[in-house]
Image: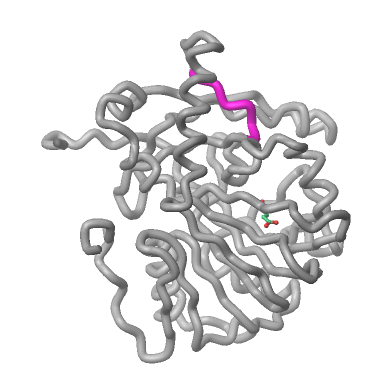
Amino acid sequence: MSAVLHHAPSHPTETLRVTRLEPTIGAEIAGIDLRQPLTPALRDELRGLLLEHKVIFFRDQAISTEQQIAFAREFGELYVHPTTQQNDPTQPQAHLIQAQDERKLYGPRTSGRWHTDTSWLLQPTLGAILRAVDLPPVGGDTLWADTAAVYRALPDELREEIDDLHVVHDFKSSLDKVGYDYPILAHPLVRTHPETGEDGLFINFSQNPSVIGWTPEKSKQLIDRLLLEFNKPEHQVRFKWQENSVAFWDNRSTLHYPVYNYGGYPRRMERVLIAYDDIPHRVRRANAA
Ligand code: SIN
């Protein structure tokens, strides 16, 4: 099992209880009250756990929107998304994530559900904190995939072929609808995580990904091949939401996939985005194997 653990385990804590959910992704964290302000030591510890597990989950946290915002602010400046609605216009940092809007965005294309937030930005958001507000009685899980595990699972020749590619992230039609003028841009497909140094894929299946300089056919073939790998349960963790559950994920090392299997139930979540991912890039190591 040690072969799949790519980071040293975080230092044991006196208060937090950490339950790893999958070998490389996902952990449930207990022994913390998110209504309380964090000490710098606790904040650093949570940040370390986020880097190690890529998405961390908290149960039984009856937090308000204000407390969710305050918690997120511990980890950086917040990003106000131009297209998402808010529950409360006086709290623009808290985005209302509603089933009907998400369905419009991703439609019936299940492929489009694997995404990372705001990758259309030159400097995408670092991560997100999502809180359950109104859940269906059953269903409505969210999955996260480990983008580094997906990259490592690709055959060597394919990894070599794609290492220097750039892929388009196109959110323009949604931005145009709200009059937000922003160009369509491309990011490197393979990026090095700025904090862990791990290489992973950076792609957003909901934003018309295509490879710069490749024919549409060749590009589609590659995107489909990558999607096949993202769809493997080996690279994923699946979270079953409950009342007062909170998820905190790293947009730089994961993609996520909301599952729509709950009919017309008006599932509602509240999301706060933490700004300023470093511009995705690839670090070439002189002695890389
Ligand atoms: C999101 O895509 O940011 C939200 C995921 C979810 O609603 O489960």
Q: Is residue 151 above or below residue 2?
A: above
Q: How many marks?
A: 0
- Give residue 278's quadrant in the image: top left
Residue 281 image offset from top left, x and y in percent? 38, 35
Q: Is residue 256 above or below residue 64?
A: above
Q: Is residue 154 above or below residue 266?
A: above
Q: Quadrant of the N terminus?
A: bottom left
Write the residue at 60% across / 81% down.
34
Residue range in magenta is 206-211
Residue 144 image offset from top left, x and y in percent? 53, 54
Q: How is the image coloured?
A: one colour
Residue lying furthest top = 215
- Asked if the magenta segment contains residue 209, the reply would be yes
Q: Is residue 146 left or right of residue 286?
A: right
Q: Nearer the viewer, residue 5 or 155?
A: 155
Q: Is residue 91 left or right of residue 259?
A: right
Write the residue at 69% across / 78% down.
244
Q: Nearer the viewer, residue 191 or 208?
A: 208
Residue 264 image offset from top left, x and y in percent? 88, 55
Q: Is residue 137 left or right of residue 121?
A: right
Write the residue at 75% across / 77% down.
64
